[in-house]
Image (tube, rainbow, N blue to C red):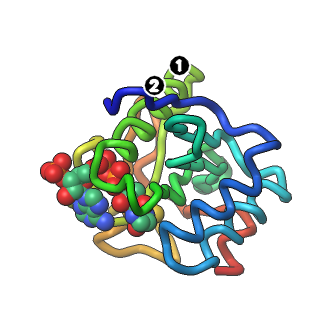
């Protein structure tokens, strides 16, 4: 972990800095708007930031995702987005943020998280397409990966928070 890196939950006062960071990391504002919509809709389960020397350099958000089966629904998580300030990318900030967030989420008894992203990156955290292949999703493809920490369904329809439909 980088010396001086602080990982903590996001606070209301971080909103402007989060918007700027996410926009810079992605080079567009679609993901920053997603973050704001998820927050406005009350769909954020956990949002963590990394700061370095008082500056916000990383952000990760987990929103509620429901896995709907026949007559049942399971509360899972969607990991998206993850953003690291361009100047700090590939220095371990993203890894530290995600690993710390996972520790907190498992301690809170969350059981399943789904991500849509590069397997070369998310595989290191244990995400695998095989674990997500049985789910029915509009986004279903090799990039849909899941990580289970406890008993969770292998099949069912993935229903993302409302803000994702505006992407
Ligand atoms: C993707 C991102 C979050 C990774 O965070 P990071 O702090 O830069 O990455 P880390 O330093 O923790 O990890 C670095 C490792 O991941 C790999 N990696 C980094 N970004 C990657 C990517 N987009 N795809 C695949 N591998 C990637 C690096 O090669 C490196 O591998 P190594 O440890 O074997 O050398 C960050 O680069 C970023 O904000 N990118 C722009 C926004 C984005 O694409 N977000 C992810 C989609 S939601």
Q: Which mark is residue 55?
A: none
Residue depicted at 38% across the width and 36% down the height: 96
Kindly tell me whether mark 2's CB lies below 8 Å from ligand 1: no
The residue singled out by tag 2 in the image is 103
Packing grade of label 2 (10 A; few <14, some 14-19, many >=20) is: few
Say left or right for 103 vs 161.
Answer: left
Q: Which quadrant of the view contains residue 9?
A: top right
In the image, which is nearer the foreground, mark 1 or mark 2? Answer: 2
Give the answer, above or below, for where 82 lies relative to 50. below
The residue singled out by tag 1 in the image is 107
Find numbered disc 2 in the image and state the secondary structure of the residue it sits on: helix
Q: Pinpoint residue 123: horizontal percent, then vertical percent.
A: 24, 51
Find numbered disc 1 in the image and state the secondary structure of the residue it sits on: helix
Say left or right for 150 vs 47.
Answer: left
Q: Nearer the viewer, residue 54 or 101?
A: 54
Q: Which quadrant of the view contains residue 135?
A: bottom left
Say left or right for 14 vs 85.
Answer: right
Residue depicted at 59% across the width and 30% down the height: 8
Q: Pinpoint residue 100: horizontal percent, then vertical percent.
A: 45, 29
Task: Locate the N terminus and report the quarter of the image it occupies.
Answer: top left
Structural distance between the alpha carbons of marks 1 and 2: 6 Å
Residue depicted at 34% across the width and 56% down the height: 89
Residue depicted at 52% across the width and 35% down the height: 53
Q: Pinpoint residue 118: horizontal percent, then vertical percent.
A: 30, 66
Say left or right for 56 vs 40.
Answer: left
Tell me if label 1 and label 2 are in contact, CB under 8 Å. yes
């Amino acid at each position: 972990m980088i010396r001086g890196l602080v990982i903590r939950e996001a606070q209301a006062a971080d909103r402007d800095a989060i918007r700027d960071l996410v926009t810079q990391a992605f080079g567009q504002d679609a993901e920053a708007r997603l973050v704001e919509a998820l927050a406005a809709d009350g769909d954020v389960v956990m949002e963590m930031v990394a700061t370095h020397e008082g500056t916000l350099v990383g952000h990760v958000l987990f929103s509620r995702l429901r896995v709907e089966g026949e007559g049942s629904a399971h509360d899972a998580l969607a990991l998206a987005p993850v953003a690291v300030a361009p100047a700090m990318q590939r220095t371990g900030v993203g890894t530290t943020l995600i690993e710390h967030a996972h520790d907190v989420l498992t301690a809170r008894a969350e059981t399943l998280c789904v991500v849509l992203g590069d397997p070369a990156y998310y595989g290191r955290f244990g995400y695998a397409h095989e674990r997500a292949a049985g789910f029915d999703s509009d986004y279903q493809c090799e990039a849909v990966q899941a990580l289970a920490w406890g008993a969770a369904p292998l099949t069912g329809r993935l229903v993302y928070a409302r803000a994702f439909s505006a992407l």
